[in-house]
Image: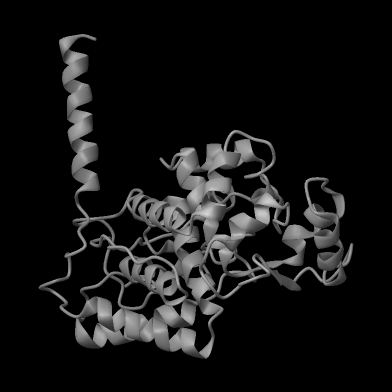
Amino acid sequence: MSSTAAAAAFLLLLIVSAAGAQLSHKYYSTSCPGLQPLVRRVVNQALSQDPTLGAALLRLFFHDCFVNGCDASVLLDDTASFAGEKNAAPNMNSLRGFEVIDAVKSSVEAKCNRTVSCADIVALAARDSVAALGGPYWAVYLGRRDARTASRSAAVANLPPPGASLSTLVSSFGAKGLAAGDMIALSGAHTIGQARCANFRQHIYNDTDIDAGFAAVRQLGCEASGGDSLTAPLDVQTPLVFDNEYYRNLVVHKGLLHSDQQLFDGGQYDYLVRRYSVNKAAFFADFAAAMVKMGDMSPLTGSSGEIRTNCRRWN
């Protein structure tokens, strides 16, 4: 490598390192003290009334970050002249929890006006939801700003479909700077929540890498045609508890989605699924680390973007 190329590579490393260092778990310690307990109280109150919102809030974070980075673009409502991400195929009639984010934002604005981004609120709500349902707790790095736009086509292009193959999953996560191991750990988010019949019908009727008895039970609530919006738990044992049952299910070929079972189907990452199925602590540690890594994907910081006062529309 020439000295010029080496200098350029070193400069790029410094830029990447600086970008990764822009977020801080103490970002609002002076500008909005008490922020995190406030967010946690609102989230816990919402989950006490409807525990299924925990999975919804976690999913909001995933679907936000995977499009153009964690910038709250997924929260923007459509307008007469704007088509956002909410009604993109992977999100339409599927994403929930927006009203919880609204409630958090309202409380935060009353305490610290025009200070805390919607993107950071989504990140905190996801962490607090996981913790409230029995999962790990981690330091959320903050300082993101909110996007002024969103892209429906980017949502379609970037969010992995429920019928994705293992190679597609590895490629999709890799394009976002997440390793295959990160993908396996983050997929454990499916230990909570529900899936629509339209998203698992192909798997329970046509795939061979599925336990026959499990497929037969799921077919009772998801016929070969129609009823696309009927749902089933991603983890039938403990759908409202964040644990490692998801991986136990995969080992016995009881993954609900085709993309789930692809993680344990005679491939090179079977060992990780087995490890998490018997070691909840290892899963929790790796999941938390991967969530921090995902939360640092291309954040808007500094003077980029804005701090929305209403998460559903730009200022």
The foreground one among 300 and 219 is 219
Which residue appears farthest toward the right when viewing the image? 224
Name the quadrant of the C terminus: bottom left
Q: Quadrant of residue 304?
A: bottom left
What residue sits 48% from the left and 84% below the top? 47
Which quadrant of the structure image shows residue 124? bottom left
Query: Is the image coloured rainbow, by chain, by secondary structure, or in one colour?
Result: one colour
- Direction left: furthest residue: 30
Quick check: 63 left or right of 16?
right
Residue 42 seen: yes
In the image, 260 versus 134, the foreground residue is: 134
- As rendered, which of 269 and 205 lies closer to the eye? 269
Where residue 259 appears, as percent x and y from the top left, is 66, 49
x 73%, y 52%: residue: 253
Quarter of the figure with residue 108: bottom left
User: How many labels sit on residues?
Assistant: 0
96 over 201 or under it: above or below: below
Q: Is residue 79 visible?
A: no
On screen, residue 79 above or below 50? above
Question: Residue 210, position in %: x, y?
Answer: 78, 51
